[in-house]
C-alpha cells in the first residue's frame, strides 16, 4: 500500500515521514494554502529524502510553464496537478522529465463520462474529498460509478483512526494524507505521521 504524506514544511516532519516508511512526501506550491512553501525550501528539504521516495510538488490551476519552472527549482521528482488540467498538460509535464499525479475531487471524477474515465485510467490519479485540504472525510458512498481501474490514491480527511476502514471499503492502491496528521491547521505532528503510516502498512 503506497503512502504519501503531503504538505510538509520542516526537516523534522520530512524525516519522520521517510523513517516511518512513506513512499512519497509532498510539498505544496499552490497559492492560498497554509502549507504552501517556496521552491527553494522544498529543494532543501528534498535533499534529505532518499532515492526511491518520491518528492511531489502540488500545484492547482497554475500555468504549466510556471509549474515546470517551479518543479525544476524545487528538484521534485513528481508533479501533482490538482485543478482542471488536461491529459495534454499531463503529457507536457512528463515530457519535461517528471512523473505525474492528477487529483480530482470525488464529485469531479463522478461527473466524467465513461470514455473520459477510461482515458484517465492510464494516468496515476488521486481522488479527494469535495474540498481538498479541508480535512473533510471521504464519503465512500460518493463513488456511485465505481472506483478508478488504474493506479489511484485515496485522499480526503484520512486519519490514523479511519484509514484502514476506508481502504477496506474502496480498495485504492495507496493513500494520501495532509490535515489528518496535523496538530493544528498546517502544522504536522510527528506522532500522527508515524501512527498513520503504521496503520496503513499493517
Image: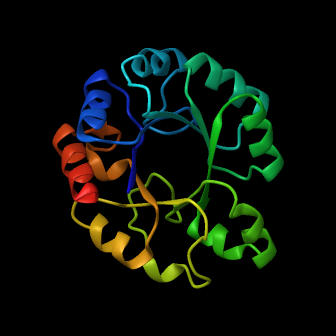
Question: Residue 130, percent across and down?
Answer: 53, 65
**Rendering colour mode:** rainbow
Q: Residue furthest right?
A: 88
Q: Residue at x 28, y 58 (%)?
A: 200
Residue 131, placed above or below residue 58:
below
User: What residue is drawn where x is 25% and y is 44%?
Assistant: 193
Q: Quadrant of the C terminus?
A: bottom left
Residue 19 lies in what quarter of the image?
top left
Please identify the quarter of the rendering in which residue 51 is found: top left
For residue 139, say whether it is visible.
Answer: no
Give the x, y percent position of residue 27: 47, 33
Left or right for 18, reference 60: left
Q: Residue furthest left?
A: 191
Q: Above or below — where is 53 with respect to 101? A: above
Percent x, y of residue 91? 78, 43
> Would you say 201 lies left or right of 38 here?
left
Toward the viewer: 150 or 64? 150
* 54 w.r.t. 114: above or below: above
Q: Position of residue 127 (x, y in %)?
A: 54, 62
Q: Kindly tell me whether residue 181 is visible in this rendering.
A: yes
Q: Residue at coordinates 19% horizontally, 50% vertically from top-left? A: 195
Q: Would you identify the image quadrant in which residue 138 lies?
A: bottom left
- Tally of marks: 0
User: Which part of the image, by quadrant, shows the N terminus?
Assistant: bottom left
Question: Which residue is more in the foreground, 61 or 48?
Answer: 48
Residue shown at the point (79%, 52%) measured from the top left:
87
Amino acid at each position: 500500500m503506497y503512502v504519501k504524506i503531503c504538505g510538509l514544511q520542516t526537516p523534522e516532519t520530512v524525516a519522520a515521514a521517510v523513517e516511518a516508511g512513506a513512499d512519497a512526501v509532498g510539498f505544496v506550491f499552490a497559492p492560498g494554502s497554509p502549507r504552501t512553501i517556496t521552491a527553494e525550501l522544498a529543494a532543501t528539504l528534498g535533499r534529505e529524502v532518499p532515492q526511491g521516495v518520491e518528492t511531489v510538488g502540488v500545484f492547482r490551476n497554475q500555468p504549466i510553464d510556471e509549474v515546470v519552472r517551479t518543479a525544476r527549482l524545487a528538484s521534485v521528482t513528481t508533479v501533482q496537478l490538482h485543478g482542471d488540467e488536461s491529459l495534454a498538460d499531463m503529457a507536457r509535464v512528463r515530457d519535461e522529465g517528471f512523473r505525474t499525479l492528477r487529483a480530482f475531487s470525488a464529485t469531479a471524477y463522478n461527473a466524467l463520462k465513461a470514455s473520459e474515465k477510461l482515458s484517465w485510467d492510464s494516468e496515476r490519479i488521486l481522488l479527494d474529498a469535495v474540498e481538498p485540504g479541508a480535512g473533510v472525510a471521504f464519503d465512500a458512498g460518493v463513488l456511485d460509478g465505481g472506483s478508478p481501474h488504474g493506479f489511484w490514491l485515496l485522499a480526503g480527511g484520512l486519519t490514523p483512526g479511519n484509514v484502514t476502514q476506508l481502504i477496506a471499503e474502496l480498495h485504492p492502491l495507496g493513500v494520501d494524507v495532509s490535515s489528518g496528521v496535523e496538530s493544528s491547521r498546517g502544522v504536522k505532528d510527528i506522532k500522527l505521521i508515524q501512527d498513520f503510516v503504521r496503520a496503513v502498512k499493517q
